[in-house]
Image (tube, coloured by chain):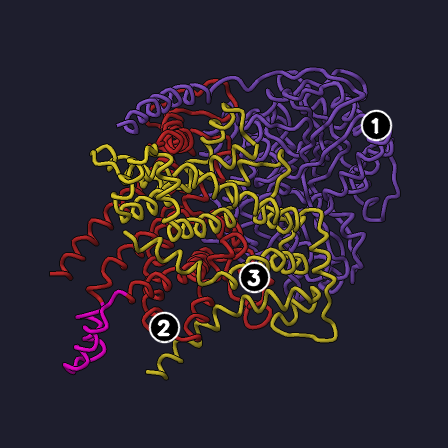
Amino acid sequence: MRRTHRGVPAVATLLSIVLVGAGACGGGFQQSGESGSTTSAKLRVLVNISPVLTKQFYANLVAPYEKAHPGVTVTIEAPTAADVSATLQQELAAGSAPDLVTGSLSTAIVPQLSELPDDSWVTDAPYAVQSKVGGKIWQAGSGTQVQSVVFYNKTAFGKAGISAPPRTFDEFTADLVKLKAAGYVPTQTAGDWVTGAQVQMMANPNVLNTKPDWFAQRDKKSVTFADSNWTKVLDVYQGWVTQGLTPANAMGLKYQDSIDQFVAGKSGTYIMGSWLVPTLDSAKLPFDADVFPMPTFDGSPAPLAGGPSIPWSILKSSKNQAAALDLVKYLVSDKTAVTAELAAEGNFRTGFDYQASALNKEIGKIVADAKTTVVASAGQGDNSAPTGFGDEVNKLVQGLYVGETSPKVISALDDWYTANAK
Amino acid sequence: MNLTRRLVLLPVVFLMVVPAYLLVVNSFKSQQDITQDPFGIPLPRLSVEYLVNALNSPDFSLIKAYTVTALFAVGVNLLSLLVSGPAAYVIARGTKVGHRALLVLFLVGMFIPGQVLVIPVIYVLKTLGLMGTVPGFLLFETTLTLPISMFLYVSYIKTVPRELDEAARMDGAGPLTTFWRIIFPLMKPAVVTAIVLHTIGVWTDFVNPQIILGPASSLYTVTTSVYAAIGKYSTDFTVVYPNLLVAVVPVMAFFVFLQRNIVSGLTTGATKG
Amino acid sequence: MLAPALALLSVFMLVPIAIAGYLSFTDWDGLSPTPGPVGWANYERLLSDVDVQHAAVVTAVITVVGTVGCNAAGLGLALLLNRRNRFTSLLRAVVFYPYVVGPIIIGFLWSAILGADGAIANALIPLPFLSDPAWAVGSITFVVVWSQFGVNVVLYLAGLQTVPASLLEAATVDGASRWQTFRAVTWPVLAPSVTVNIVLVLVGLLRVYEIVLALTGGGPAGRTSTFAFLILSSSFRSNQLGYGAAQAITLMVVIGALALGVTALRQRAERAVAA
């Protein structure tokens, strides 16, 4: 029978493919790219999409560069997985990584990124030096974003009989109670990624003020979440949840919902990064919006927690290293590009001024008044948390809404960190 | 009986139809009208503006997405038939234990969750140089159709009398010729069933195009386009409803037109065992 | 003639399973050049991982309730629709259309209906459909059944065509009640159909992913993640491809075991009704 014999080579193919395939999944993705030319290149850029950073925004951002460099075309690519980091992981695995990337990346990815030169346009970029990993500069931001402020509804504060913004968390909580009595959602939050991000914004200034290299120390286990102000912050937050000072349906809201509610004047306060400013400025607010720095436990001024805004990195695998570097240089040092990036998110950088709104100036004042600066979210460079920290914090903090308690959250956080630390 | 029938059927119909009603009505309403009165029809304020926006959305090129998805469906169906038809013929006509075992091997695939396969498949495709490419995607999707195709074709071919093969062999035809010339023309019902099932499968697949095509290919199917268009904006109902409607209408037209074939296809597909 | 089919099956199914199996014994993060062997550590971690426990419970609830729901609704409706007229084919289309639309679009549509600012909250009463974990799992299960039971209706209708009309008439002549007729005549003939329906739904529901993605994104607090969702969302996000592979292999084994187990049980039941 002819056809049964046909089966034999098929099985042989199968076996050889099993062997080749299994062996091939390790190794071989660190092909380093070629330098290429700066005048002719097709650059793929993976970007972080948000309500203010749309695909169109990025397209407009690079348009002048493309015009000045007719041989260079830039393709903007939005994440297809949950976020930039997960999409980049997938693309690296697939061997189809872009040339440039912008968005928050974990330091685990740094070996896949090109080292940026020690030139002044790089070192001048906010957080480029602070985020070094093993001495290597791997990202350059276009500005600084502030993540230790609380937006508030001044009109609501007036109606609730609150004369001045709180300085301590005790005052903050007391004000929230008054806001509730006045019929407002005391502090706005949402499910999505928002819950965890807000608690990080509360914790970072209060944890890192005494130990700026806290994450690095946590890696060595010389500090723990349980022994730090994280415990106090979570106690405060749990108190808010149990007293109904956050929206009852918080877990059903998306980020945009929480913005909409604050914009509509339904909520008294909203802990959010400075990137909220352009949204508030462009909305016709039915109230006066203002901002105050994150309260502390003893009322002393909190350090400013900040991070790079729209940070750019180049992938090692890119075959257009020279062109990619030239584009990054444009994006973090050209006046037009940088101010466009700053204005989009209401961020800051000395020497790059743009038409700032009143709210923007208020945040500027907070920035200027701050005596010290600490890193935001999951840290920077060698002083940063393991991959997935933000997701884990978010998930655990949301647990407070579904019956968990703050001691349990803290111990779960410590366990997770220990299991995942480098 | 008729009363009980009605008492049961009415709520069911209501439950099934209401989401579709909301989808259609709210595609023409403003955000305010949608949130204030989701079920209402504010006649004077209805507008096609939102639908037009959805059609012009930079994230969702309707015509491109439909063309891409339709071509994928055609490609997968063709490949699936070319590959599984002859194989099913050999297995159906085979008399050895090995043939039976091969069929089982193919059928086991029905129980393998796509989530198990898709991540390792990235590495296989990468090794083959096919990751992020249309051929790579088509080959993987075709593989996912094999269990159903093999099942349908083998059971169908078994009902075709062997005498036909013998006659062809007398005329000097090889097995491949015999299959395509003699057997294949008789397999129409099974082929239609397979095409219906695979087309729905490819059309509604989200994970595989999302991961295997990725952002690099810049190819979006209907499902990945919808995700790109509304994933981040799911609170703006003037984006959500019109985009969903735009994605659904052509499929529904297709469904209404071919309902009988789809249903009978599905039925023979699952009851032939 | 077998070679192309076997090649595809090997390259895109058997090899990937082998790779997943291999990776599940490593600590691979998807980036390092060589995966480091860790023995059974990933599988041991599965047993103590709270996220996995939550996902297992959620998946079990969706699967059990959903399988019962799809089959009860499917068979019940099929019995009511088991007559030939225009009305029947219209109703069949009405219950079946979500299957053609596909889960991701269905998920987004229902999220606009059940969400905090959705149609029901705004038109009727705000209930925590998606914001409370227990409610959210209920909502997911409902939407899954809503979108899939049409297939069961169609399959059961086909099964009912195989019930010999002569037997039904004979039963009526003998003065059997409707229930007695169903029990004695219809049910035994339908037995194989029931098996197919149960197995198909079961296997399908164990991999629910898109509806979770669109409805809740696994939240709040990760309490609505199904097993399939956990695998796809955690592998790349936390750089744990080895661990993700262990989850995937586990899911595959569970599905295989359940499909085999249910088929075996049903075969016994089928023989019992036949006897």
Check residue C81 in the rendering and tell me which mark sits there, or answer none. Answer: 2
For disc 2, the chain is C
Q: Nearer the viewer, residue A142 or B183?
A: B183
Q: Position of residue B49 (x, y in %)?
A: 74, 62
Q: Position of residue A345 (x, y in %)?
A: 76, 42
Question: Seen in the image, is A163 located left or right of residue B205?
Answer: right
Say if A344 sits above or below A281 in the image.
above
Q: Is residue B11 visible?
A: yes
For marks 1 and 2, give the one nearer the viewer.
2
| Helix, strand or loop under label 1 | loop
Check residue B253 in the rendering and tell me which mark sits there, or answer none. Answer: 3
Any magenta on residue B179? no
Check residue A393 in the rendering and tell me which mark sits there, or answer none. Answer: none
| Residue A101 location, quadrant | top right
Same chain check for tags 2 and 3: no
Residue type at mark 2? Leu
Q: Residues within 10 Å of mark 1 (few under 14, many from 20)?
A: few
Residue type at mark 3? Ala
How far is the residue under mark 1 from the one under mark 3?
45 Å
The range drawn in magenta is C162-186
Any magenta on residue C171? yes
Say if A30 sits above or below A373 in the image.
above
